[in-house]
Image (cartoon, coloured by chain):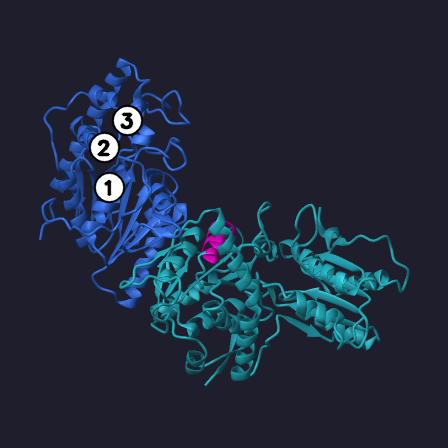
Chain colours: A cyan, B blue
């Protein structure tokens, strides 16, 4: 029987990991991820979870270690955040290139300098090209559910690509919510066994020795990298399959890589990701009550990037109104350009522009907010929608500034 | 059964690689795997042996093997060892081969972690005394006075000093077994590999492995150098086991350094008075080594 518990995001992740039965866990502490590995160590000590719990000496070693275990054909887990994710950056590209089906949790946190332990998404956005599937949870429940689904996706033999499950630091990792913790039998039936089957690609075999993590000359290298990209693009289907099957069995969640909210007839659409989506939804309900046609697209997966889903949701034939302006709200900045998510969205829109020319595209505004854990208030979100309304030409647009920093008045 | 040159396995587990003629490192890998056998899991970080052994699609290792990130040999070994425990596998060896840069410099942190956790791994450093794979740059194990491509006049950071003592670093972690060896004394080396394979915990071998390409010596000088470096006292054969250190060779007198140095172009810039100073450093190192042996055995 599933049980209702009052859990933080971090604790929900630990529960999801316990239910997924990894055989090896590598742990190195960093705020605000620490609760995850603390809870897991308790579970291993109390024998609720039969796993080797290894105290490593760095994040670089954490990811390298679970790669070694995965090469042996067993399910693993590790977790990190911020500077730790940066320190293991080499190993992110390494493990994805080696097609090791790892699952890692990242507590989204700002990057030094200046030092700051609070949440933003600069860390994972900086590693968008590392070859990992990236998913962003909104709630503690979704965090638990995504850990379980991440194993199903990563280990799918068509995918064999590691998955990074992102939770906003503190806002999600440390906030308590009622969370349904599924029972072990149902999860066991949902996931493949934690020991990969004999002959699983990219694992050692005593009878047929394998060389893994090899080198390749320029010609072969390009082929390896193309297949890595091709399989990541194709992973969208297994992701939908897993999400759909999960929803069917557990009665919640979604098969969608982007989750729409009151978007079908919205003229002003905000695109965001992670925990801030809840506040945006509340604002949308209020503005809708005032007669404004506003909506939300919550991006769940940044990799593989759901370009076609995005275009369908913004411009598809099932829409009941044309989108007049698009906002992208995100907690990161690619210095010297725009927010990382905006760059992704705009790249997808350009393909739409080619398809729909000469109709053109609605204006797009990029809101950079919440850096270093700054709260994003309802008032600020309302002001963003005001900006979008002006951009849509309702009240006369101001000179176009596509990137807007929100909350700078709090800065000295 | 004690393994010797007479009963050493005829099986080859490191074959068809692209190492240079006279490569000491490739001998270390080849001989080690003959002792440890087919149920071995090998980890090699970036470095000569991985560069010459894993060129797709021509794989040179006859056992399960993978390349690790440069800094992470100890961590990847630990990950394999953890999975060995999780799966309850018996009679397997988890062995790493890393160069001197991969061990004494960039890999020291993860090696320390593996030692500290008492992982059941065998870690073998094949020491060719510089970053050879990248083109003979100075490493944390380059001997004083040696010419490398980043110390073209000879490496002289201070007055002569001994190399970083990796075996005593390992011993300070409380590992059950740590030893030096040289490709010039294969019987001693094979015996130590066999011991390492029997240890329930981490073991560490620091093996002298000449590099004719990097040292500017003849490619048939590898074994001669491997004997000479021991006989001159520059590379003591020593082992640390269960808390006590012991000398495997304890010469009363050393062969003069000049003969050893003259075989290699990398020491060409040394002046006679510097060689004398190096001999005094060697003598001091032996004094300290003998004291370590005496004190650890007395305890």
Distance in Å between CA atoms under marks 1 and 3 = 17 Å
User: Residue A305, how many percent across, how many down?
Assistant: 62, 63
User: Residue B56, how many percent across, how many down?
Assistant: 40, 51
Which region of the structure is painted magenta?
A86-97
Based on the displayed image, in which of its 4 quarters is residue B91 positioned?
A: bottom left
Residue A166 visible in the current orientation: no
Q: Is residue B4 above or below residue A108?
A: above
Residues at badges 2 and 1 in contact (C-beta under 8 Å)? yes
Task: State the residue position of label 2.
Answer: B222
User: Residue B79, how many percent across, how many down?
Assistant: 35, 58
Picture mark count: 3
Q: Main secondary structure of the magenta part?
A: helix
User: Going from the N terminus, do you reach mark 2 or mark 1 first?
Assistant: 1
Q: Which SS class for mark 3?
A: loop
User: Residue A127, how many percent across, how many down?
Assistant: 56, 54
Discs 2 and 3 share one subunit: yes
User: Going from the N terminus, do you reach mark 1 or mark 3 first?
Assistant: 1
| Direction bottom: furthest residue | A1
Confirm whether the magenta stretch covers residue B201. no
User: Going from the N terminus, do you reach mark 2 or mark 3 first?
Assistant: 3
Residue at 33% across / 30% down in the picture?
B214
Task: State the residue position of label 1.
Answer: B27
| Direction right: furthest residue | A396
Distance in Å between CA atoms under marks 2 and 3 = 8 Å
Based on the displayed image, in which of its 4 quarters is residue A138 positioned?
A: bottom right
Q: Which SS class for mark 2?
A: helix
Residues at badges 2 and 3 in contact (C-beta under 8 Å)? no
Task: State the residue position of label 3.
Answer: B217
């Amino acid at each position: 029987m599933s049980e209702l518990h009052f859990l933080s995001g971090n604790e929900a992740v630990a529960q999801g990991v316990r239910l997924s039965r990894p055989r090896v866990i590598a742990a190195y502490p960093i705020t605000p991820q620490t609760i995850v590995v603390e809870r897991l160590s308790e579970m291993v000590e109390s024998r609720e979870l039969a796993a080797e719990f290894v105290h490593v000496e760095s994040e670089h070693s954490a990811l390298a270690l679970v790669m070694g275990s995965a090469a042996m054909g067993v399910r693993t887990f590790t977790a990190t955040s911020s500077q730790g994710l940066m320190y293991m950056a080499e190993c992110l590209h390494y493990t994805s290139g080696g097609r090791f089906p790892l699952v890692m949790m990242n507590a989204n946190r700002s990057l030094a300098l200046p030092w700051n332990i609070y949440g933003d998404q600069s860390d994972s956005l900086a590693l968008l090209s590392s070859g990992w599937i990236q998913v962003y949870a909104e709630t503690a429940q979704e965090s638990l559910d995504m850990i379980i689904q991440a194993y199903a996706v990563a280990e799918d033999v068509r995918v064999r690509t590691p998955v990074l499950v992102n939770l906003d630091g503190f806002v999600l990792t440390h906030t308590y919510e009622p969370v349904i913790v599924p029972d072990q039998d149902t999860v066991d039936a949902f996931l493949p066994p934690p020991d990969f089957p004999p002959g699983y690609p990219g694992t050692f075999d005593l009878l047929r020795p394998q060389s893994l993590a090899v080198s390749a000359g320029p010609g072969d290298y390009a082929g390896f990298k193309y297949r890595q990209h091709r399989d990541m693009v194709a992973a969208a289907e297994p992701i939908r399959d897993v999400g759909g099957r999960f929803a069917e069995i557990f009665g919640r969640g979604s098969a969608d890589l982007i989750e729409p909210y009151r978007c079908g007839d919205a003229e002003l659409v905000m695109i965001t990701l992670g925990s801030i989506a809840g506040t945006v939804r509340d604002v949308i309900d209020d503005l809708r009550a005032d007669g404004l046609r506003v909506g939300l697209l919550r991006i769940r997966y940044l990799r593989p990037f759901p370009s076609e889903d995005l275009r369908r949701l913004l411009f598809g034939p099932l829409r009941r109104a044309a989108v007049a302006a698009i906002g992208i709200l995100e907690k990161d900045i690619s210095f010297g350009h725009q927010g990382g998510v905006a760059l992704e969205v705009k790249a997808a829109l350009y393909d739409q522009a080619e398809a729909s020319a000469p109709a053109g595209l609605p204006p797009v505004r990029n809101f950079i907010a919440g850096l270093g854990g700054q709260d994003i208030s309802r008032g600020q979100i309302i002001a963003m929608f005001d900006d979008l309304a002006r951009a849509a030409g309702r009240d006369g647009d101001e000179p176009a500034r596509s990137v807007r920093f929100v909350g700078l008045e709090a800065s000295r | 059964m004690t393994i010797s040159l007479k009963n050493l396995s005829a099986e080859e587990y490191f074959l068809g690689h692209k190492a240079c003629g006279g490569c000491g490192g490739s001998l270390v890998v080849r001989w080690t795997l003959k002792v440890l056998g087919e149920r071995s899991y090998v980890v090699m970080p970036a470095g000569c042996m991985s560069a010459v052994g894993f060129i797709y699609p021509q794989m040179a290792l006859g056992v399960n093997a993978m390349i690790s990130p440069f800094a992470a040999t100890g961590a990847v070994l630990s990950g394999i060892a953890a999975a060995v425990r999780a799966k309850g596998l018996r009679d397997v060896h988890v062995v790493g081969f890393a160069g001197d840069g991969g061990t004494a410099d960039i890999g020291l942190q993860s090696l320390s972690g593996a030692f500290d956790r008492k992982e059941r791994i065998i870690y073998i450093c094949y020491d060719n005394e510089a970053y050879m794979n990248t083109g003979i740059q100075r490493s944390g194990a380059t001997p004083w006075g040696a010419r490398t491509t980043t110390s073209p006049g000879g490496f002289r950071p201070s007055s002569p000093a001994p190399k970083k003592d990796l075996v005593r670093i390992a011993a300070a972690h409380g590992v059950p077994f740590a030893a030096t060896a040289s490709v010039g004394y294969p019987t001693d080396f094979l015996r130590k590999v066999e011991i390492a394979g029997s240890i329930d915990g981490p073991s560490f071998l620091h093996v002298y492995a000449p590099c004719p390409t990097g040292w500017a010596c003849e490619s048939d000088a590898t074994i001669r150098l491997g004997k000479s470096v021991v006989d001159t006292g520059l590379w003591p054969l020593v082992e640390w086991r269960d808390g006590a250190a012991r000398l495997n060779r304890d010469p009363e007198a050393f062969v003069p350094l000049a003969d050893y140095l003259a075989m290699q172009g990398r020491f060409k810039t040394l002046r006679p008075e510097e060689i004398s100073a190096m001999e005094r450093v060697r003598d001091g190192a032996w004094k300290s080594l003998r004291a370590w042996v005496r004190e650890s055995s007395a305890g």
